[in-house]
Image (cartoon, rainbow, N blue to C red):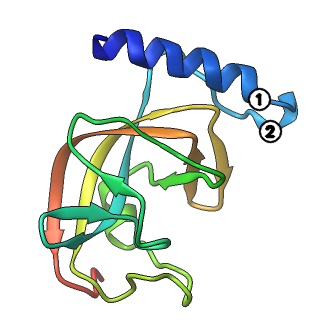
Amino acid sequence: MPLEDRLDSLIRRIRHEVSSADEVLHWEPVPYVGYKAVAKQGSKWLSVFDGVTEYSLNELTVAGHNQLYVYPTHDEARAASFPMQSRLNGAKMVVLKVLCYGPGRCSGRKWAFRAVLPIAVVDVASPPFR
């Protein structure tokens, strides 16, 4: 199935799952562009928080029971801090430019989305980013 058809199907499924209109602060049929800090483990890019969610260029990553957090700018993603219980704190970090799919919700300086599509590697650095 072409990527566009898969994305359309995902958008329809996510819209169906939205249970409360007041949770939805941002929903665009056209993706939102954001930046995501991830851990580099060998050849894989993984969630710093859970150490399991994997990200690959041009492959859609859909959140399970959680949300996928992104920042509006590269600099904010580079300066991201993670909870102490994050499984991959201290790992080598990568910032990915991602297309984000709603519903989106603001959480402090970052946005939470249900799905992201990494489209480019923007930065590679060893911790700490700052």
| Classed neighbour count for the residue bearing mark 1: other residues with Cα under 10 Å, few (<14), some (14–19), many (≥20) | few
Q: Position of residue 95 (x, y in %)?
A: 26, 60
Earlier sequence position, callout 1 versus callout 2: 1
Q: Quadrant of residue 33?
A: top left
Report which residue position mark 2 lands on.
23
How far apart marks 1 and 2 lie (CA) works out to 8 Å
Nearest-to-viewer mark from 1 and 2: 1
Residue drawn at the location 33% of the way across and 41% of the way down = 98
Q: For the point 50% across and 82% down, which residue is it? A: 86
Tag 2 secondary structure: helix
Q: Around disc 2, counting alpha carbons within 10 Å, would you say few (fewer than 14), some (14 to 19), or many (20 or more)?
A: few
x, y (%) of residue 79? 37, 73
Q: Is residue 118 left or right of residue 22?
A: left
Along the viewing direction, whichever of 107 and 92 lies nearer the viewer: 92
As drawn, 55 above or below 119: below
Left or right: residue 1 compared with residue 30: left
Q: State which quarter of the image contains the N terminus.
A: top left
Q: Residue at x 87, y 32 (%)?
A: 20
Tell me: residue 126, above or below residue 80: below
Q: Amino acid at mark 1?
A: Val
The answer to whether 82 is drawn above or below residue 95 in the figure is: below
Residue shown at 31% from the left, 68% from the top? 78
Q: Is residue 126 above or below residue 31?
A: below
Quadrant (top left/top right/bottom left/bottom right) for the C terminus? bottom left
**Residue corresponding to mark 1:** 18
Q: Residue placed farthest to the front in the image? A: 1
Which secondary structure lies at badge 1?
A: loop
What mark, if any, has residue 30 been given in the picture?
Answer: none
Q: Which amino acid lies under the numbered mark 2 shown in the image of this protein?
A: Glu
Assess whether mark 2 and mark 1 are in contact (beta carbons under 8 angstroms): yes
Q: How many marks?
A: 2
